Image: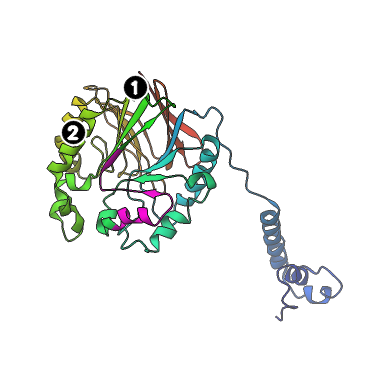
Amino acid sequence: MKFPGRRFPAVYFAYICGVGKNTRQHSSHIPMYMKKLCFAWFAVVLAACTTTQPEKKAAEGTYDGELNILMLSDAGRNGSYDQRLIGEWMGVYADLLGPEFVISCGDLFHYEGIQSTSDPLLWSNFESIYTHSELQCPWYGVLGNHEYRGNTQAMIDYSQVSRRWNMPARYYTFAVPLDDDEADSDRVRFVFIDTAPLIDKYRRESDQYPDAQRVDPDEEVRWIDSVLNASSEKWKIVVGHHPMYTYDDKDDIEQENMRARLEEVFRRNAVDAYFCGHIHTFQHIRTGRDSIDYIVNTSASKQRAPQRGPLTQYASENSGFGLLSFDKGVMHYTLVNSRGELEYEIERRK
């Protein structure tokens, strides 16, 4: 069969179906089932050409505080799975809330981290995904286990290259006022910690995680304790990658190592919430032994099915990101799933 020219698909449709005087003589040789198939195919193409994607809109009732922050974890998949979709939803909510900054709870670069400040993964996993103008605000990150497979110093050094990426050290802290008077009673203390070196297996497996041995875990814990102890801010928020409490199939010894080093430090210094990632499901856990909210962010790309236990307040298999907001006396967290829905909310007052 000779095709009647290169004006495909319209001309080919006319050729097969016998539309037009120049094609009717040829269409008699085409079986009826092919004509029906062609009509069905053309209908699908026409629908695709005339149907537009619905505009993404932020959900009504989204909490808008004096200080708004977006939070994500375990995102880096070069735009695949749900990463690009979630990046678009982050832009929608950033446009609504005007975040002060974005927090990455680690593993922004699967699977082997980055090798240098010019690594192509910085573009394919970060710069080309989160493109909305309101996401060009500062980003503050921590190192995840996948970053520890690469060059962790490059993650820090990228702060000197990128306009928005900020990681001044492997662990660091700052405080943010909720109003102009900057009184400590109306400020939020953020403490960003480096969790891989606090877990024994990462330091032992130096062939896979060569940089983990560069950090003295005891020295880091002393630093965390001193920062929290000196803090007089109303809210104390700690951000890391590995959970202290969660229900999942990963090695329980990781959580045991984390709790052995940090749980008493957090309790003694009245930490309000610990945000992390790593397990690719959302989990909110309270132990009942203190007032700390342990919030495991879901994956911002590829999620897993969650498990639940006696300490579980809520768990979700949906991918997504978090909205963290503060007002005077209020901390509000919202899980936004990959459909843009406000799936779960946590509010604390003091």
Q: Is residue 43 magenta?
A: no
The residue pinned by badge 1 equals: 185
- Residue under the image location 44 percent in, 59 percent down: 124
Q: Label 1 to label 2, Cα distance in Å?
A: 20 Å
Name the residue furthest front. 181
For mark 1, give the secondary structure. Answer: helix
Tell me where residue 190 sits by quadrant. Answer: top left
Residue 107 visible in the current orientation: yes
Q: Which residues are magenta?
A: 154-173
Tell me where residue 25 sits by quadrant. Answer: bottom right
Does residue 3 lie above or below 296 as drawn?
below
Please indicate whether residue 95 sits to the left or right of residue 218 in the image. Answer: right
Please indicate whether residue 342 sits to the left or right of residue 204 in the image. Answer: right
- Residue under the image location 73 percent in, 73 percent down: 7
Mark 1, Cα crowd under 10 Å, few <14 / some 14-19 / many 20+, is some
Instruction: In the rendered structure, find residue 225 and report the number of the disc placed on it.
Output: 2
Name the residue furthest top. 350
Does residue 9 lie above or below 146 as drawn?
below
- Amino acid carrying label 2: it is Asp
Residue 118 at x, y percent in the picture: 37, 64
